[in-house]
Amino acid sequence: MLQKTNKKQNIKPFRLVKFFTFSSLVIMFTATIVISALNVHWVRNILLEKSEEYASLLVENLNHQIISRFMLPALIQYGEIRLREKKQFLLMDRVVRSTLHSFNVEMVTIYDEKNIISYSFDQNKIGQENAGGVHYEKAMKKQATSRLLQQGSFIELLFWFPRETKIITFAPLRAEKQLSPALAGPVLGVVEIVRDVSDDYKQIVKLQGLIVGSCFIVMGILFIVLLSVVKQGEKIIEKRADERRKLEEKLHQAEHLSAIGEMTAGVSHEIRNPLGIIKSSAQLLKKKMDKLDAKSQIPDIIVEESARLDNIITDFLDFARPKIPDIHPCRVEELIEKNIAYLNPQIEEHDVQIIKDIPDDLPEILADSTMLYQAFLNILINAFQSLKNNGCITIRIKHDYTNICINFIDNGEGINEQILKKIWTPFFTTKDTGTGLGLGIVKNMIEAHNGTITIVNMEPKGANVEVTLPV
């Protein structure tokens, strides 16, 4: 429970980073939408303003052309202006169309002083009354106005991408003074010009979309980077938490083993003295019984069990109080040969094959030969115990400039995975007799030489004990 709490406390800062990351992205996303909306509104206003200026120039030019090329010639030729007559209408239409040619004007409508449509590209509108509305009234008061008209579906208008965008401008049609055409006279009517600016507006909207899309891409990349940083940080924190947990477990285990070792050493030392007395007394009793020619196996049993108990106590002391190695130059291959010579009777009895893969150029190492001899002997004995008759043990040695690696490989049944996990646990054993300290003592001996020892299963069967020692 404490470990889970510590883990949560370690990851908590990254939860704050996550919250900050997502909050920042939401704020940036909202700000982008707001800025985009403001930009579109700003672009609409600029487009409307520029269109008003452009339309005013068109109206001014059209006003001059209508006065000079239509009204004056019509008054001179016909005495009055009557656009209902076909000749005057065609003259008016020719003047208007030639003036606005190539200016992308979709519709021109002219209202007279009574708000009646006198001229239009759409002849069906001619004669309509009160069609100008509020904009007509403002134009009659010499005030030009423009408005933006957009058409499209609800989705198109919602995302500021209308199908059509038009500018409708109302401007007064004024008489020009003869002395100075630049000076405007009274208002004779109102001109309505409809210009299609869909292409211009779409180009601007595309630019806005490009900006918004770029912002989304940048935010997406930033989000991925921040998310990867957070995940990597969480992995590092979790890894460090696991390492800390393992170190704490090892520390607790070391403290526990240290306490057990001290207790074992003290108890073993106290047991050894009376045990020696029991053993020597049993030996004296056996000698006296031999003189009296009395036959009994009790003294032999006492001596044998005392020796076995003495070996157990020795294992306890060796595990609880590891010896300090007596370092001097020695050769690993010579220690292996001594081990094989010692075990030769068992090798012949069980018909075990020993395969040696040892190079000739092995370097010397600085080590305690007695301790390594005992460690290798224990490993070989364990290998023998895992074999059946006609088994095989391979001793393979490799080396480089820094280490010598000794592998003891047998072709037995291998080690159960559950047992393999507990194999270094003190007092753990699968044998009917034994203290479970043999491998622990071997590990202490190897580690006392700054080496390592590992045990793994081989495929398809067997086990491999690998010992690495520094050169």
Image: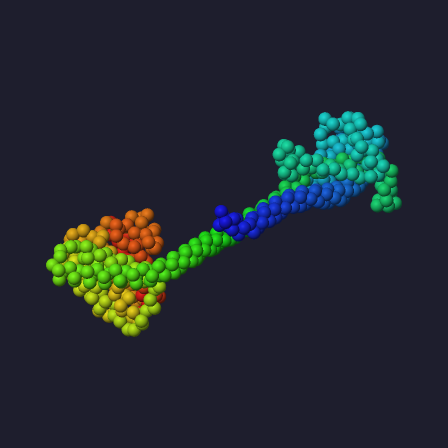
Front position in the image: 117 or 9: 9
Estimate the x, y position of residue 397 in percent, counting from the top left.
25, 63
Q: 170 and 211: which one is in front? A: 211
Q: Nearer the viewer, residue 8 or 18?
A: 8
Q: Residue at x 25, y 70 (%)?
A: 331
Q: Is residue 30 above or below residue 116?
A: below
Question: Residue 234, how many percent across, how many down?
Answer: 50, 51
In this rendering, does residue 457 appear at all?
yes
Instruction: Look at the picture and state if 76 lies above or below 427.
Output: above
User: Splitting the image into 4 quarters, where does residue 356 fall?
Assistant: bottom left
Above or below: residue 181 compared with residue 375 = above
Q: Position of residue 17 (x, y in %)?
A: 57, 50
Figure disc tally: 0
**In front: 105, or 296?**
296
Say whether residue 99 is left or right of residue 187: left
* Quadrant of the image occupied by residue 205: top right
Q: At which x and y percent is residue 385?
A: 22, 54
Quarter of the figure with the C terminus: bottom left
Residue drawn at x 13%, y 62% as measured from the top left: 291
Q: Residue furthest left?
A: 293
Question: Looking at the rendering, which quadrant does residue 114 occupy?
Answer: top right
Q: Is residue 340 left or right of residue 312?
A: left
Q: Residue at x 50, y 53 (%)?
A: 237
At 13% across and 57% down in the image, what residue appears? 294
